[in-house]
Amino acid sequence: MAESVQETVDAVYTADSRRVLATLIRLLGDFDAAEEAMHDAFRAALEQWPRDGVPANPRAWLVSTGRFKAIDVKRRLSRFDSLDEGEDGVDDRLLGTVDPEAWADRESVEDDRLRLIFTCCHPALAPDAQVALTLREVCGLTTEEIARTFLTPAPTMAQRIVRAKSKIREARIPYRVPEASELPDRLDAVLRVIYLVFNEGYAASSGPAVTRHDLSSEAIRLGRLLVDLLPEPEAMGLLGLMLIHESRRIARVSASGDLILLENQDRSLWNRSFIAEGTALVERSLASGRFGPYTIQGAIAAVHGGARDAGATDWNRIVVLYDALLRLDPSPVIELNRAVAVAMRDGPAAGLAIVEALLDRGELREYRLAHAARADFYRRLGKNTDARAAYRRALALTRQEPERRFLERRIAELEN
Amino acid sequence: MKYACLVYLEPGKLHAVPDSECAASGDKLRQRGQLVAAEALQPIDTATTVRVRNGRVSVTDGPFAETKEHLAGFYLIEAADLNEAIQIASRIPPAREGSVEVRPVRALQP
């Protein structure tokens, strides 16, 4: 009996602890108090459920218990506060009668989760703090886990989180889903955080491995949650984009940990159900007519996902999609990606001309992938000396181990 | 003629002068009819900078750090939360040219 109750508590923790926390933050108005109350509530569940049985609605029980634990704490603190004459220091929000059944109401609970996401991704918090806070509060990762995945010392990460929470409290960042008028900008901030987490996992910018799977799957979980709570076209587009990228995870790294380019990947290793799900999401977003850059990038990924081999890729459609993307979101990195697609459609000389012009403009001069693309065009044109020099330039700029090995291999091939 | 008096302190010296002394000095000025508004501010960690460029509001964490820009004015506003404060700050006309730092006030301890 005791063992199975323990299992039930564990299962409820995994499934519902973030919902309980999100509601407690609303009721208590404070992140730290809510976390403490939630842990007190789960401790009480471990004591009481074996004796009294598992309540019919465990989540409502936990919220209600957590809230009363927090009232106890406040009462105890106020008793020591000699200046507090007459009143017990517990504010109305805590004492107000709340019907525990109302917390079981899916809508208000899910609103709390959305409130939590928008608060953690508030633009008044530093970008790295938004990411850390989202992973901790919305995904439930520990500070140590977040520090490890970002290769940051744990005390630094802890300080970042403490500072963000203190700003939420002191500057009074509201616990609210933005109004329709501010939603587009605020949703952008949420999507940016999710995409940043995904990219950090998918294309680890530093460190020994090409990918850090745990972060990518957290980002996809966040993406699913967001689409579930707020089915906006760009949220669907971003989830679609992440799923299609994720479908190639196994195919993109060799057994020895080396990077395999899209054109050389074994496409039978691609996860077809991710591609199907991602493509359907992107198409739904495109059909809405209210899509943005994530959806277009998702549509580009879907073209690759739908091609049975590299030769069958519809490069013209990809170039057209890049043109659309550049109109929405002009950036030299996207121009570079477009150049690669143009090279596939019209030949390496066409791509080279675009990249040379881009490098002349200066913004990408220190960007390793610009030099790698230029090197590849020279290689395909048979200009081996120019290719080697460009690969060396890319090599000098890379900080990622598997990428370094890939570039060194290319240089060695050109020397033979 | 109104004057804005803006106090600058190193972070470590925020509490160098006791709050009670500041409150007493404020009261004295108020009694003499010499004070419109005076507040202590929360530390710089709580600052948010608002800018308006091409009609779009940009919000960033932290104080504005453009050393070329000098203090040009001062508003004391009343807002329910940071979102409302940002809305008000984004309607302050010079937000289009420079930036407006939004910082919550701190109640003086008795």
Image: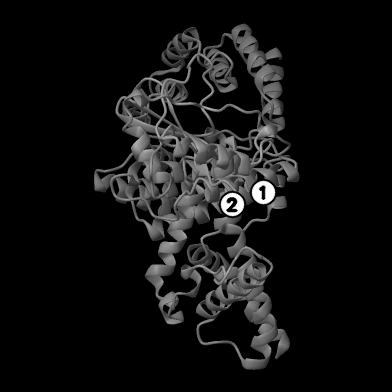
Let me know if residue B33 appears in the view. Answer: yes
**Residue under label 1:** A146
- For disc 1, the chain is A
Q: Give above or below for A345 relative to A226.
A: above
Which residue is drawn at the image coordinates 42% and 22% (left, top)? A335
Whether label 1 touches label 2, CB < 8 Å? yes
- For disc 2, the chain is A
Residue at far front of view: B32
Which residue is drawn at the image coordinates 72% and 46% (left, top)? A148
Which residue is drawn at the image coordinates 72% and 35% (left, top)? A207
Quadrant occupied by the C terminus of chain A:
top right
Q: Measured from the top left, where is residue B87 in percent x and y?
A: 34, 39
The three-letter code of the residue at mark 2 reads Leu
The three-letter code of the residue at mark 1 reads Ile
Give the quadrant of residue A89.
bottom right
Residue A135: which numbered mark, if any?
A: 2
Let me know if residue A10 appears in the view. Answer: no
